[in-house]
Image (cartoon, grey):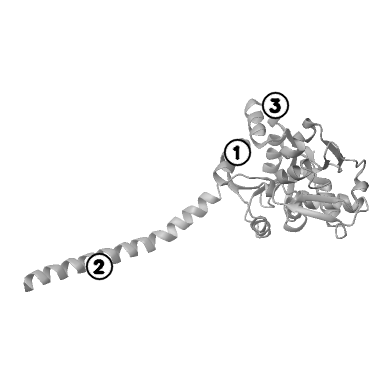
């Protein structure tokens, strides 16, 4: 019996020593793995993508959607471009502030605009066509112009949505005080269209690039007013991306329409092409939105 206990004790001790040795090996290996990770990170560019509140896809769908574009951009610069999907506005802002992203492509255009103005990023290109706020009404609506909506029921996407900011800025410029108007907010742009279609609101505001905006007139309904076009889906680059690669990225973006692979990537994303431009329009848009 005593011999049995001694055997068991030796077995437990052996296991304990083996576990301790494994922990030592892992502790030694961890720094090397971390250094390897950093080295690999330096060999690729991280492209952060945000579709804002109008995008209803998850991370896996986003990776499949934007990988063709990322692959073409990576091929142009001879360096892998990896997509990361950022759903949270706060995470997108914080990531730009901390310069965690090499490239940022965001449909809430005010975020890339702040990336350029406040966080040292530079604008590579904006998508075609520009974005607009469409003010929509029912086909039987008596409203003739946007000013006629004063005192009426108005519905927009949720308050934090970029297009809501866009529409409210246009209301302001048209002399309607949003604080005094009867404005309701919906979770999604589809709900805005449904509310106007069913006469639960006299006027709604949606993005020109939304399915509601694209299809609104097909059933005889009217777009009462279109706000001025503004930069759409800007793609910006961190200040650590060298100038020669920025030039190659811009050339690749503007040339997507000229190749079959490029056309497929554009169709997958849902844009017609890209315009390489300086940041003047983008910064002017941000100033317009922030105007009191």
- Which residue does the numbered mark 1 point to in the structure image? 65
In the rendered image, the vertical position of residue 249 relative to residue 88, given as above or below: above
Q: Quadrant of residue 138?
A: top right
- Which residue does the numbered mark 2 point to in the structure image? 16
Left or right position of 252 against 181: left
Question: In the image, residue 174 lies at what x, y percent?
Answer: 92, 50
> Can residue 283 be seen from the camera position used here?
no
Question: In the image, residue 63 lies at what x, y percent?
Answer: 57, 42
Q: Nearer the viewer, mark 3 or mark 1?
A: 1
In the rendered image, the vertical position of residue 41 relative to residue 268, given as above or below: below
- Spatial distance from mark 2 to mark 1, Cα to Cα? 49 Å
**Residue visible at 84% across and 46% down in the picture:** 202
> Can residue 85 be seen from the camera position used here?
yes
In the rendered image, the vertical position of residue 9 relative to residue 189, given as above or below: below
The quadrant the N terminus occupies is: bottom left
**Residue visible at 93% across and 47% down in the picture:** 148
Circle 2: is it few (<14), some (14-19), or many (20+) Cα within 10 Å?
Answer: few
- Spatial distance from mark 3 to mark 1, Cα to Cα? 20 Å
Q: Foreground residue, 205 or 258?
A: 205
- Which residue does the numbered mark 3 point to in the structure image? 258
Question: In the image, residue 282 lies at what x, y percent?
Answer: 80, 48
């Amino acid at each position: 019996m005593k011999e049995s206990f001694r055997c068991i004790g030796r077995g437990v001790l052996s296991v304990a020593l083996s576990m301790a040795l494994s922990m030592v090996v892992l502790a030694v290996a961890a720094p090397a793995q971390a250094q390897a990770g950093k080295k690999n990170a330096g060999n690729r560019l991280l492209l952060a993508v945000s579709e804002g509140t109008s995008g209803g896809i998850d991370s896996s769908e986003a990776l499949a959607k934007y990988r063709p574009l990322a692959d073409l951009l990576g091929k142009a610069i001879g360096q892998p471009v990896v997509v990361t999907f950022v759903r949270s506005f706060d995470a997108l802002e914080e990531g730009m502030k901390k310069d965690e992203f090499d490239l940022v492509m965001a449909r809430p255009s005010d975020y890339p605009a702040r990336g350029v103005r406040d966080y040292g990023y530079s604008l590579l290109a904006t998508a075609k066509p520009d974005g607009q706020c469409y003010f929509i009404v029912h086909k039987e609506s008596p409203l003739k112009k946007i000013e006629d909506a004063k005192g009426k029921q108005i519905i927009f996407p949720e308050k934090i949505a970029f297009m809501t900011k866009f529409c409210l800025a246009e209301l302001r410029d048209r002399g309607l005080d949003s604080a005094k108007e009867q404005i309701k907010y919906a979770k999604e742009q589809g709900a805005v269209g449904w509310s106007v279609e069913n006469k639960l609101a006299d006027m709604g505001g949606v993005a020109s690039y939304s399915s509601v905006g694209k299809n609104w007139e097909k059933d005889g309904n009217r777009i009462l007013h279109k706000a001025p076009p503004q930069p759409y889906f800007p793609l910006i680059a961190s200040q650590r991306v060298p100038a020669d690669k920025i030039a190659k990225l811009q050339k690749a973006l503007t040339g997507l329409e000229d190749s079959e692979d490029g056309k497929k990537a554009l169709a997958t994303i849902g844009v017609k092409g890209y315009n390489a431009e300086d940041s003047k329009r983008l910064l002017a848009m941000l100033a317009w939105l922030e105007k009191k």
